[in-house]
Image (spheres, rainbow, N blue to C red):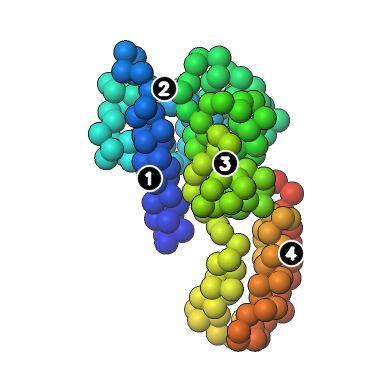
Amino acid sequence: MRRTVNLLSLIGALAGMAAIAVEGHAQDRKPIVGLPWPGPPGTHNGLAAFTQGLTARGYQPARSVMIIEAYAGGDPERLPETMTELLGRRVDILVTPGGLATRAAQRATSTVPIVSITGDPVGLGFARSLSHPGGNITGVSSQASEFSVKWLEMLLAAVPKAKRVAALLPGYLVPRLVREVAGAPAKMPVCLRRSPARHFVF
């Protein structure tokens, strides 16, 4: 439940950033927000939170802002196709959930603003730094690697008898996790098993 609430909060923040990004556009037409999604139609579990976030900023979907959705049908290889579709419809901004969608958007355009949720935007090459991302990509991080030790501390507080912990993470986060746990002020009494994931949406 906590993970769901946190993710919805991130999506709400994403919507706020998207609203700010479209405020500077011409007033003679409604700004258009492109929403690519890796899965099939009906599976975008953050869509309601996103529209609520826009509404909180004073943007009414279909009235003062247009939202165009494009779905990859569960096939990551179709994400570039969804970006082409959205850019062809002259979207003012792309809102991308996760690293795969953000990578496809990054390759598709260097001019249309991209607002994303990703695990590690700096590590993935989407931003120069969190404070100064540069380029046309901004957004929020859903799983900053510096929280790794805190995650383990919380887990051990909940399950104090745990001795072995499996970390299912994108490959680029595994070395950081190992370094941070090894350098933690308090020795972690667990054996950490690393399991890099090949296909990670976030």
Cα separation between marks 1 and 3: 22 Å
Cα separation between marks 4 and 3: 25 Å
Task: Name the secondary structure under disc 3.
Answer: loop
Residue 195, located in which quarter of the rendered image?
bottom right
Q: Are marks 1 and 3 in contact (CB under 8 Å)?
A: no
In the image, 95 versus 28, the foreground residue is 28
Please name the residue shown 64% across and 83% down the image: 188
**Residue under label 3:** 134
- The amino acid sitting under disc 1 is Gly
Q: Is residue 165 visible?
A: no
In the image, 35 versus 58, the foreground residue is 58
Badge 4, how many Cα within 10 Å: few under 14, some, many 20+?
few
Q: Earlier in the sequence, mark 1 or mark 4?
A: 1
Q: Earlier in the sequence, mark 4 or mark 3?
A: 3
Task: Name the secondary structure under disc 2.
Answer: strand
Cα separation between marks 2 and 1: 18 Å
In the shown orientation, is residue 156 left or right of residue 174? left
Cα separation between marks 2 and 3: 23 Å
- The amino acid sitting under disc 3 is Gly
Residue 175's tag is: 4
Residue 3's tag is: none
The picture places residue 122, in percent across and down from the top left corner, at 63, 51
The picture places residue 31, in percent across and down from the top left corner, at 38, 22
- The amino acid sitting under disc 4 is Pro
Nearest to the eye among marks 2 and 3: give it: 3
**Vertical position of residue 163 compared to residue 22: above or below:** below
Residue 11, located in which quarter of the rendered image?
top left
The picture places residue 157, in percent across and down from the top left corner, at 50, 81
Q: Earlier in the sequence, mark 1 or mark 3?
A: 1
**Residue under label 2:** 32
**Vertical position of residue 136 compared to residue 146: above or below:** above
Nearest to the eye among marks 1 and 3: give it: 3
